[in-house]
Amino acid sequence: MSAEKRNALGKGLSALLNDSEDVLPYKKSSTANNSTGSNGEVSNLGSVNDIRLSEIEVNPFQPRTDFDEQALADLAASIKLQGLIQPITVRRVSAHQFQLISGERRLRASKIAGLTHIPAYVRTANDQQMLEMALIENIQRENLNAIEVALSFQRMLDECNLKQEELGERVSKNRSTVTNYLRLLKLPPTIQASIRDGEMSMGHARALVTVEDPAQQLYLHKHIIQQGLSVRKVEEMVRDLQKSRPKKEGKQPEPVSFQLQKIQDDLASKFSTQVKLKVGSQGKGIIEIPFLSEDDLARILEMLDW
């Protein structure tokens, strides 16, 4: 990443957090009262304060849903030995209540380490600013899986009223990258779960997104998992599948009735491929069951007890 881009990123996040020059270096208080005034409120909103863990509630806008338990344990051990180096960021809800903006992993590890207080930047932010800060902080600094990134992008579009170009600027990614992540959310839930759990890569997912039929997506997904297909192999299978599709030229077939559409969908689900029914005016017709390879043909014939 270029120095110019890094500076732009830093400026954008600092502008949101409002902590570019007014944050004082963190100095651990010898007692809890050193970070509060006579009325019990945290002093110096621009500085780093020691805050009781019991007074911090989890950020309801946190995009991360999975936390590696071993990684948390390792971080907790480091915190026990060296303390928490990077403060979390919170917003004050009341004199003795705070809400986490960013740093949930550090917060969880600090609890495991047995800390009673944690260093924190205290900010003032409305819900939309808080959501945007949490999403940007996680996308930039945490190892979110591709589905979590896609969900975070979608939330920023929906809840922060951003366009894709603006979103790209916020997270320092071009529009095509943002689009590729968002397209993952159009995949069937089973495939999204495999991406989330690391069973298949972003490259596999991008190949599957180009397949229009969900049944064929699921068929390819099954073979990716069972046979450990490479991204290149999946791309080849997708290209072969697309070549076999009839071109949409000339007179298009008449649409089938609701009953026949239901039969067509049930057959597609049964054979895990795109089945087509062509019915003439006298009730005669053809059933088309395409296959992707010789192995796929053998699978279909086996299902037909051939």
Image (cartoon, rainbow, N blue to C red):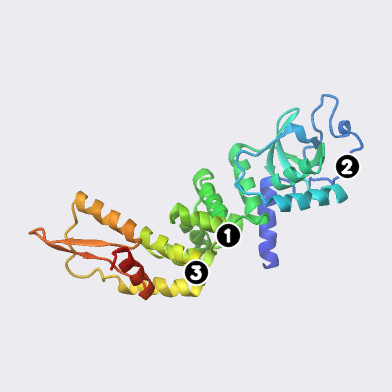
Mark 2 or mark 3: whose residue is earlier in sequence:
2
CA–CA distance in space, label 3 to label 1: 15 Å
Residue 211 visible within the image? yes
Q: Is residue 178 above or below residue 14?
A: below
* Residue nearest the viewer, comparing 72 with 250: 72
Q: How many numbered circles does the render carry?
A: 3
Q: Quadrant of residue 222?
A: bottom left
Q: Image check: 195 left or right of 29?
A: left
| Label 1 close to label 2 by CB (< 8 Å) | no
Q: Please give the name of the residue rendered at 31% of the width and 62% of the height, measured from the top-left corner.
A: 274
Residue 121 picture location, percent across and down: 76, 42
Q: Image check: 54 left or right of 1?
A: right
Q: Quadrant of the C terminus?
A: bottom left
Q: Kindly state the secondary structure of the residue where label 2 is placed.
A: loop
Q: Image check: 18 left or right of 193?
A: right
Mark 1, residues whose alpha carbon is within 10 Å: few (<14), some, or many (≥20)?
Answer: few
Q: Residue furthest right?
A: 30
Check disc 2 and report the residue beneath it. Answer: 28
Q: Residue furthest top?
A: 39
Q: Kindly state the secondary structure of the residue where label 3 is placed.
A: helix
Please give the label number shown on residue 38. none
Q: Amino acid at mark 1?
A: Gly
Q: Quadrant of the N terminus?
A: bottom right
Q: Amino acid at mark 2?
A: Lys
Q: Is residue 109 above or below residue 246?
A: above
Check disc 1 and report the residue beneath it. Answer: 198
Check disc 3 and report the residue beneath it. Answer: 227
